[in-house]
Image (cartoon, rainbow, N blue to C red):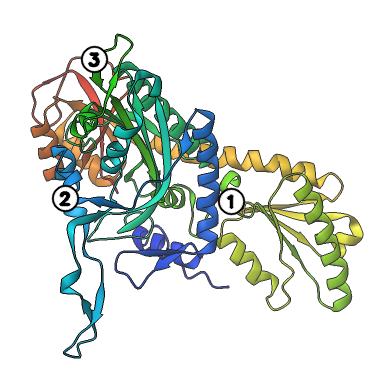
Amino acid sequence: MAKDLTTRKENYSQWYNNLVVKADLAEQSAVRGCMVIKPYGYAIWEFMQDALDKMFKATGHVNAYFPLFIPKSFFGREADHVEGFAKECAVVTHHRLMNDPNGGGVVVDPDAKLEEELIVRPTSETIIWDTYRNWIKSYRDLPILCNQWANVVRWEMRTRLFLRTAEFLWQEGHTAHADREEAVAEARRMLDVYTEFAEKWLAIPVYRGVKSANERFAGALDTYCIEALMQDGKALQAGTSHFLGQNFAKAFDVKFLNKENKLEHVWATSWGVSTRLMGALIMSHSDDDGLVLPPKIAPIQVVIVPIYKNDEERTITCQRGAELKQQLEAAGLRVKLDDRDNQKPGYKFHEWELKGVPVRLVIGPRDVKEGTVEVARRDLMSKEVMAYEGLVAKVTELMQAIQDNIYQKALNFRNDNTFEVDTWDAFKEQIEKGGIVHAFWDGTTETELKIKEETKATLRFIPLDVKEENGTDVYSGKPAKMRVYFAKAY
């Protein structure tokens, strides 16, 4: 099976596009900017979804569902929110089609114009807070800890599979609280959840921080984020959690009677991650041979490939493979026995390497006779012969070893590509090479925008534990009190 992948060194962008398609993760659809997520890609997303859903529920959250369509008037109630999303909104204006009386095919029925136009959900703060107004009357109704799994539409002009599409899948949490402290604690708690998921499940090391005023979510008072570094030296925002203050409660008149029997506005958060994490997963770990999947979210953790030359050998190797599959599955592993007789072993090896299966077990007639199995690790592209006896325990242990190795490799790369600089020349030189740059910033949006204009680098985050220190802004030369992180980004 020829992989036909452009190498990362030749053209990283083309390598990524090739890999998404050839590994059967996704493909372009008939609708511009929208993708078809194929079964193998969707299986990975399901494992992500399942892990996150359990983490949400363990922290007291429940799932709900809110409408796809949002009245246009709702967006006008929170000024920053509408400004942030106005250019990305898809708008429904009519509710019926008709045959063109002039023979021009199907046209919009002019008599079916909606009384109020509807926005196809780009995010759900407005429809949810209009709903919460009916749910919240007293402090006894709080907190509300809701999450929804949904699709959203943001009309992007330039799209890339998983990374930026007009429609994508995500989860969005929306919580309501009786006081500021509880809401801030919720936003920070969900950042902790995202950090644990990224590092323990996706094996992606992340930095944690807060966005600058210029980069925060439209309508938020603070946006907390996790940022990852891809192999081409660009950063990727892997998840965000927003402290919304009372902005949406005021916009939708959501008040409650507090313990002193006084009316006050509710405090809010929202937080979300999306199928963009699929892009992060691919770009963090994969290589020129294909995907490299952490075992925790790999749809197939172990593939067994019998090798034979005739029907007799096929029978004994496939029988041994079936026995091994049953034993591995009993140990809790996800296993595929590739006993297809219309493909050669080499084709199968390449296919499962391309799809990132963590462990490949090969069984030939001699292995059956001698009680051995060839064990190949995808993360190391290595192989060794092991005894059949005790193999299940060894392969089970390998899962964590592979998970840890993939994470450590990504962590080493990130640490080796994070640079502290003190001069504008050094800043420009390093940003051009790639990586994350740690530099003094004077705290002004003006300087932040100038840096972006001249280098295309954005201020990715201010560290949560930023320490105040005296320095000089790397661009303006003005006094600065903290170092922050800049990078070119997806």
* Quarter placement of the N terminus: bottom right
Q: Position of residue 212 (x, y in %)?
A: 21, 31
Residue closer to the observer: 298 or 174:
174
Residue 243 to residue 82: above or below: above
Q: Position of residue 277 (x, y in %)?
A: 42, 47
Amino acid on which the number 3 mark rests in the picture: Glu
Q: Earlier in the sequence, mark 1 or mark 3?
A: 1
Q: Secondary structure at mark 3?
A: loop
The secondary element bearing badge 2 is classed as helix
| CB contact under 8 Å: marks 1 and 3 | no
Question: Which residue is denoted by mark 1 in the rendering?
Answer: 298
* Residue position marked by numbered label 2 in the rendering: 86
* 3 or 2: tag closer to the N-terminus: 2
Q: Position of residue 422 (x, y in %)?
A: 20, 27
Q: CA distance from mark 1 to mark 2?
A: 38 Å
Relative to residue 150, is residue 350 drawn left or right?
right
The mark found on residue 468 in the picture is 3
For the residues bearing labels 3 and 2, Cβ distance under 8 angstroms = no
Amino acid found under the numbered disc labelled 2: Ala
Within 10 Å of disc 1 (Cα), the crowding (few <14, some 14-19, many 20+) is many
